Image (cartoon, grey):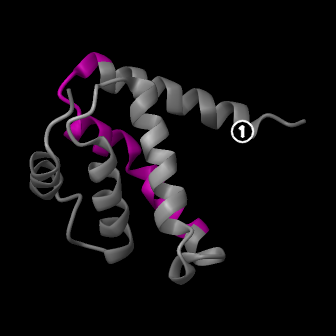
Amino acid sequence: MMPTYDEMMQRLQDADLFGTWEPLDDFHRNLMWQLRESPTSGIGLVTAWHLSAEDVFGRPQYRGMTGETFRRVAEVEFNRVVDTITPSVEVAEQAKAFQRQLREEAAEPG
C-alpha cells in the first residue's frame, strides 16, 4: 500500500520536492491525493501521474504553452518523486521502466 497523503507530502518536503513552485506543488498535492493509501503498482503510479498532470495542468491558469512547460518540468522530477514516495524499490523501478517505455513509444515516428 502507498503511504497516507500526509506521509507522502512530508517525504516530498523532506526531499525538497515541495514548497518551491506553486504549479508543481498543485500537481504534487493532486498526485498524492490520488495515490494515498492505494494499492502499490508501477503502472498505477504512472497512471496517477498522467491523470494528475491532465487535471492540474489542464486548468485555465496553466493551459497552453504554460501548461506544457509545467508538464515538462514535472517530467524531469518523475524519478525523484517516485523514489521518494514509493515504499517498494521494486515498484518504483517498475514505474520508471513503464514511464520510460511510454516516452520511447511517444517519440517513435508514425
Looking at the picture, how far across and down is residue 62, in whole percent?
Answer: 53, 77
Along the viewing direction, whichever of 53 and 75 lies nearer the viewer = 53
Quarter of the image holding residue 68? bottom right
Can residue 72 be seen by looking at this rendering? no
Q: Main secondary structure of the magenta part?
A: helix
Quarter of the image holding residue 2? top left
Above or below 30: residue 23: below
Looking at the picture, how far across and down is residue 19, in whole percent?
Answer: 20, 70
Above or below 54: residue 69: below
Give the number of marks: 1
Q: Is-magenta flag for residue 85?
A: yes
The residue that label 1 is drawn on is 106
| Rendered residue at 44%/51% (across/down) | 76
Above or below 101: residue 57: below
- Quadrant (top left, top right, bottom left, bottom right) of the C terminus: top right
Determine whether, in the image, residue 52 is placed left or right of residue 24.
right
Above or below 34: residue 98: above
- Quadrant (top left, top right, bottom left, bottom right) of the N terminus: top left
- The single residue placed furthest to the right in the displayed view is 110
- The single residue placed furthest to the top in the displayed view is 90
Within 10 Å of disc 1 (Cα), the crowding (few <14, some 14-19, many 20+) is few
| Residue type for callout 1 | Ala
Determine whether, in the image, residue 51 is placed left or right of residue 89.
right
| Rendered residue at 17%/59% (across/down) | 16
Check disc 1 and report its element: helix, strand or loop: helix
- The single residue placed furthest to the bottom in the displayed view is 61
Can residue 103 be seen by looking at this rendering? yes
Q: Which residues are magenta?
A: 68-90
Looking at the picture, how far across and down is residue 70, in whole percent?
Answer: 50, 67
